Image (cartoon, grey):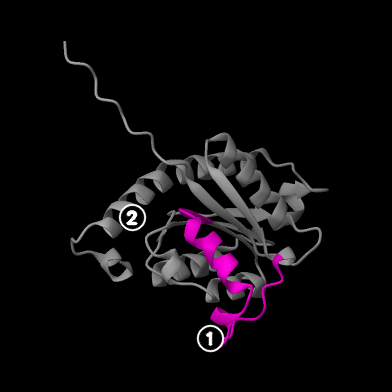
Amino acid sequence: MVAPKEQTPQPALHVLAVSGSMNSESVTRVVVGEAARQLIALGCEVDMLDLRLEGLPMYNPETSHQTPHFQPLQQRVDNADVVLLGSPDYHGSISSATKNFLDHFWREFGGKLFATVVVSHEKGLTVTDQLRTVARQCYAWALPYGVSVMAEEDVKEGEITSETLQQRLEMMSRDIAVYGRLLAAQRRADLASKEPGFMARLR
């Protein structure tokens, strides 16, 4: 009888969960935090990045990469297999804090999975599209849907009150865990190989 081959355990999936709101009572922060809790329960390692607390200066392409704040943040982005982006909807666009964070990086996003949470008075479709456009321009993948949050209806006094939103977050967290692991494994293989492909530019 042939003994079954031992399977090499997969490394933990690292998720950078970004809250892009500067509001002290942010609904974005509540929802991203709940997604983080679910991801941890699914065996992921989550790094919460609250841009309100980070104090990230405005991006300057001539100087930002040499400032003291940049390297520690770059390391956190580098460590991530998945980037979960949460942003409020401001005039049909992403928040300035979210945009500023995204402006600092591009190579670090290549080949990784992006997932989006948008807090809006409407459906936040334009904001979701903008976040997915950033992912595409940075050679990243994006889930084919985003989670849209109606602030007054879905979250009250810092708690999620909508069963529909809770179910949507459970779906997204599951998909991040499943597809994030698949893409992370392929990304590592592509970076280690000499085969052609869009990841070759990042070797």
52 up-or-down from 169: above or below: below
Image coordinates for residue 37, horizontal then vertical, percent: 64, 41
What residue is at 30 percent from the left and 59 percent from the top? Answer: 191
* Image: magenta residue range: 54-83
What residue is at 40 percent from the left and 68 percent from the top? Answer: 136
Q: Can residue 153 be seen in this view?
A: yes
The tag on residue 47 is: none
The CA span between labels 2 and 1 is 27 Å
Identify residue for label 1: 61
Towards the viewer: 163 or 9 = 9
What residue is at 39 percent from the left and 65 percent from the top? Answer: 110
Amino acid identity at mark 2:
Arg
Amino acid identity at mark 1:
Pro
**Kind of element beneath mark 1:** loop
Image coordinates for residue 127, horizontal then vertical, percent: 56, 67
Image coordinates for residue 181, horizontal then vertical, percent: 40, 44
